[in-house]
Amino acid sequence: MELRQVEYFLAVVENEGIGGAAAALGVAQPTVSQALRALERELGVQLFHRIGRGMVLSAAGRTMVGPARQIVRDVTAVDDLLTVAGDELTGRLDIVAVPAVAQGPLIDLLVQFRDRYPSVAVRFGELRDETLAATMIEDGHCEFAVAHLPIAGDGLEVIVIGEQEYLLVYPPGSDVPDGPIPLEQLPPVPMVFVPRGQSVADEIEEAIRVAGTRPPLAVLSELREQRLPMVLASIGGSLLEKSMAESVADRAVIRTVDPRFVRPFAIAFDPATLSPVGQAFVELIREAVGAGPDQAPSPRLPLIE
């Protein structure tokens, strides 16, 4: 197995096809196709399902993504150590984040990092299930994962970088009291919720239950990103991240909750396996948030304030 084949494999994954990979790599499409097929023959597995003109990762392909990224990071780290012009950091920062926190403090950190190390590329991926944050790091898919607390994982260090407040968002024209609305007095407006099993959803539902109120359920949606469109379509209200709620303040009815729904979010990493790029990013994070190098993993903080 050659490094070039691994890089081509990852390029197809990240650019969602051979055409995009070839353009990103600056090579011809047949070159990428031939490298992939050679890699599959050598490994004895099919990495992609070819469906028409599309490429879909097979089970074996999904398993290989993490190790492949780790291989590239390791080789880049060795190259950095051997580079004569050692003052310039090169390589790639691999980070994933849940969409709700992929803004604000996190973006500020990435801007500062790129300003300081312009030769480092950043791969900024989506973490769809924040309960898998530790697994993504442990399996090599990324060096850093950003998610709401708690982030559990053996040997991981966790640094809090911000907090996310949740607001009530109701369809346009909804007749609801002026805020903040006491939790025990939620209006009887049908609501759009996500299923239990997602940590924030569980805590919100538990807080509502303890408060003794139970608004009618309109939709239980596993697609978190569909909550806001459903609210704007007047299907029901929902509890949404503050940034998301404020983006539609001119089209929906926004209310705060009493007590506030607040959830800290943090960046997690394994200090024992950091690349030089990762170590530089951690140093910048500590400078930005004032976290000492011996900071213990952050405890779980309450959702309600």
Image (spheres, rainbow, N blue to C red):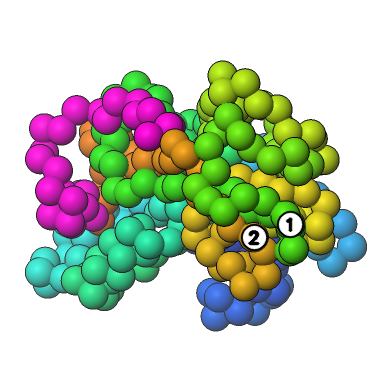
Label 1 vs label 2: CA separation?
7 Å
Q: Secondary structure at mark 1?
A: loop
Q: Nearer the viewer, residue 161 or 64?
A: 161
- Tell me which corner region of the image, top left, top right, bottom left or bottom right, holds residue 207: top right
Residue occupied by mark 1: 174
Question: Residue 299's x, y, as percent?
Answer: 29, 25
Left or right? Give the position of 207 relative to 149: right
Between 35 and 275, the one lying in front of the other is: 275
Q: Amino acid at mark 1?
A: Ser
The residue closer to the viewer here, 76 or 269, is 269
Q: Does 123 lie within the magenta span?
A: no
Residue 98 visible to the viewer: no
* 1 or 2: tag closer to the N-terminus: 1
Residue 292 x/y as whole percent: 10, 40
Looking at the rendering, the stretch of residues picked out in magenta corresponds to 279-305
Q: Residue at x 43, y 61 (%)?
A: 103
Left or right: 74 with respect to 192?
A: left
Asked where in the image residue 305 lies, by quadrant, the reply is: top left
Closest to the observer, 101 or 3: 101
Mark 1–mark 2 CB contact (< 8 Å): yes
- Give SS at disc 2: strand
Q: Residues within 10 Å of mark 2 (few under 14, many from 20)?
A: many
Q: Residue furthest right?
A: 52
Q: Which residue is mark 2?
A: 253
